[in-house]
Amino acid sequence: MTWRDNLPTVRGKLLRDEPLAPFTWFRVGGTAEALFIPADAEDLADFLKALDPSVPVTVLGVGSNVIVRDGGVEGVVIRLAGRPWAQVTTDGDAITAGAGALDSMVAKASAKAGLAGLEFYAGIPGTVGGALTMNAGCYGSETKDVLVSAWGLTRAGERVDYALADFGYTYRHSEAPADIIWVEAVYRGTPDVPAAVQARIDEITSRRETTQPIREKTGGSTFKNPPGHSSWKLVDEAGWRGKLHAETGGGAMFSDLHSNFMINPGEATAADIEGLGETVRADVLLKTGVQLDWEIKRIGRRL
């Protein structure tokens, strides 16, 4: 008998050997040994408390910033999907959002409530949980600029509460333990005219649509910006914009539209896409002496 034969009873969905490719923007990757979509935070806490502590747990949001490797993911993959995880409410200058809420929905709620400062969330293709984990940001703003507090669950299913200062945020990095599964966040905006907030959101949305390959199978920004540099310029200057990788039969490539966005225009595998990223990292280092670090998360086993 294995751990999969003795999984806790849940109220949500619990699936075995579930393909993960449909849950990622790249549309690649293997299966999860077990996939759990909890009904709510209580269901998740009970599951974690009852799950064998030796079983690995991985959280998957909307799959916008991740490569799931072809060999699949060991242990349990937890996906915070559905209405209980995506609620966004406002009260005065505070916005409370579930970890499964899209960042764009937080921006939309801020406009409706006449709260400025969260417009940049309209340009981030992920969820609140992911934004908390990596201090997500764009267009000059970051999560740390608007976050008040958040709470989540440890691997053991115990609640932990974090104020902004507890995260120790730096560029695309948090000092919070990596195994915390975020449940809810509270943000603070600045009162403004709703139409003015919406206009700034519309501008960000339009800019994103014209400069990023958002309708392709992509993973968002591939590399973090090194100090003093823009990753897209380094990739561009190294000659990789729009260039098919000769060693990837599936045609993984960096976008013509934005050279820090990898795309899967055909039937590339996770290995093709990750391999292209590593090839470009090595080439940029060789040509410029600048080290590119991944912004896209890679999870699971290689075949």
Image: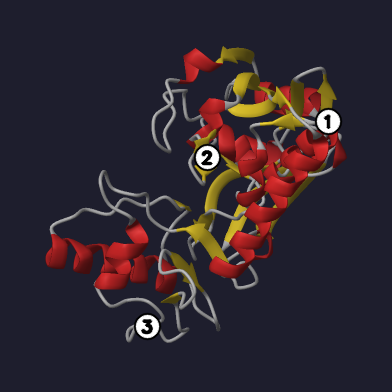
Image coordinates for residue 203, horizontal then vertical, percent = 66, 54
| Residue occupying the point 60% across, 23% down | 147
| Label 2 environment density (alpha carbons within 10 Å; few <14, some 14–19, many ≥20) | many
Please state the total of marks drawn on the protein image. 3
**Viewer-nearest of discs 2 and 1:** 1
Query: Which of disc 3 and disc 1 is earlier in sequence?
Result: 1
Tell whether 211 sits left or right of 203. left
- Please say if 257 is above or below 39: below
Screen quadrant of the C terminus: bottom left
User: Mark 1 Cα within 10 Å, few/some/many (few <14, many 20+)?
Assistant: many
Query: Residue at coordinates 76% horizontally, 25% vertically from top-left?
Result: 96
Disc 1 is placed on an element classified as helix
- Mark 2: amino acid: Ala
The residue at which mark 3 appears reads as: 243
Q: Nearer the viewer, residue 255 or 247?
A: 255
Residue drawn at x 41%, y 24% is 175
Question: Can you say whether 289 is above or below 194 in the image?
Answer: below
In the structure shown, which secondary structural element does the residue marked by tag 3 occupy? loop
